[in-house]
Image (cartoon, grey):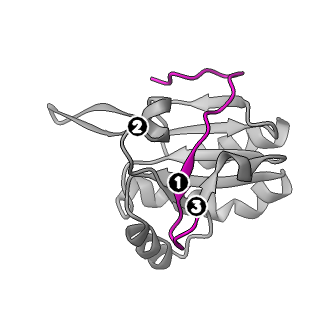
């Protein structure tokens, strides 16, 4: 799935945030980061995942780790998602073709009920303070995932 491996430098990126700003790899310098890719705002699994990370945000902060959720949804959809579910994790839009999710292999072919289509493959990356990939979770199952990532961030 991923075209990057643990130990590799995370690729450079610049993505739009819901407030009209942007987030870049340079913004993460000097802190650990968790970047989680999810398919779509306001769908059951994605809502659960975002709420789980939100619930643990203060614990991630204690572990010196920044959280960023990424999908191809627009900044406006992210604003609605944040407001509807009281999310406190930062979100970013990776809508451009050949963006970060494409580089990482997080955007790819999916199958559901016999139908094949292109979509976001739920996956998570833990980065160190220098932007190197410490851990990759490909094809994530939501239940218990945020807790597992927090434990990895604490021990990294």
Q: Can I make out residue 107 in this image?
A: yes
Between residue 96 and residue 49, name the one nearer to us: 96
* x, y percent for residue 1: 45, 23
Q: Which mark is residue 129?
A: none
* x, y percent for residue 122: 45, 40
Are circles 1 and 3 on residues that touch, CB within 8 Å?
yes
Position of 120 with respect to 13 (left or right) is left
Q: Classify 1 as above or below 67.
A: above
Position of 27 with respect to 120 (left or right) is right
Q: CA–CA distance between discs 2 and 3?
A: 17 Å
Q: Classify 90 as above or below 67.
A: below
Q: Is residue 9 magenta?
A: yes
* x, y percent for residue 6: 67, 22
Q: CA–CA distance between discs 1 and 2?
A: 12 Å
Q: What stretch is highlighted in magenta?
A: 1-21
Q: Residue at x 40, y 72 (%)?
A: 76
Q: Residue 98 carries which label?
A: 2
Q: CA–CA distance between discs 1 and 3?
A: 5 Å
Instruction: Tell me the SS state at disc 3.
Output: strand
Q: Is residue 114 magenta?
A: no
Residue lying at the far left in this picture: please name it: 114
Instruction: Tell me the SS state at disc 1.
Output: strand
- Which part of the image, by quadrant, shows the C terminus? top right
Q: Classify 78 as above or below 95.
A: below
Provide the residue designation for mark 3: 22
Q: Residue 15 carries which label?
A: 1
Most common SS among magenta residues: loop
Q: Can I make out residue 144 in this image?
A: no
Q: Earlier in the sequence, mark 1 or mark 3?
A: 1
Q: Residue at x 66, y 54 (%)?
A: 67
Q: Earlier in the sequence, mark 2 or mark 3?
A: 3
Q: Classify 24 as above or below 42.
A: above
């Amino acid at each position: 799935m991923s075209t990057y491996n643990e130990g590799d430098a995370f690729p450079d990126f610049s993505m739009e945030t819901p407030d009209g700003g942007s987030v870049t790899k340079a913004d993460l310098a000097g802190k650990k980061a968790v970047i989680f890719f999810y398919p779509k705002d306001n769908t059951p699994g994605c809502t659960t995942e975002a709420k789980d990370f939100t619930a643990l945000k203060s614990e991630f902060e204690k572990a010196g780790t920044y959280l960023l959720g990424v999908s191809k949804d627009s900044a406006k959809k992210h604003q609605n998602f944040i407001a509807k579910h009281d999310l406190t994790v930062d979100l970013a839009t990776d809508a451009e073709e050949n963006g970060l999710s494409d580089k990482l292999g997080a955007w790819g072919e999916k199958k559901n009920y016999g139908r094949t289509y292109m979509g976001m493959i739920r996956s998570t990356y833990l980065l160190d303070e220098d932007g190197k990939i410490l851990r990759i979770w490909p094809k994530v199952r939501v239940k218990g995932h945020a807790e597992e990532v927090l434990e990895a961030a604490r021990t990294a």
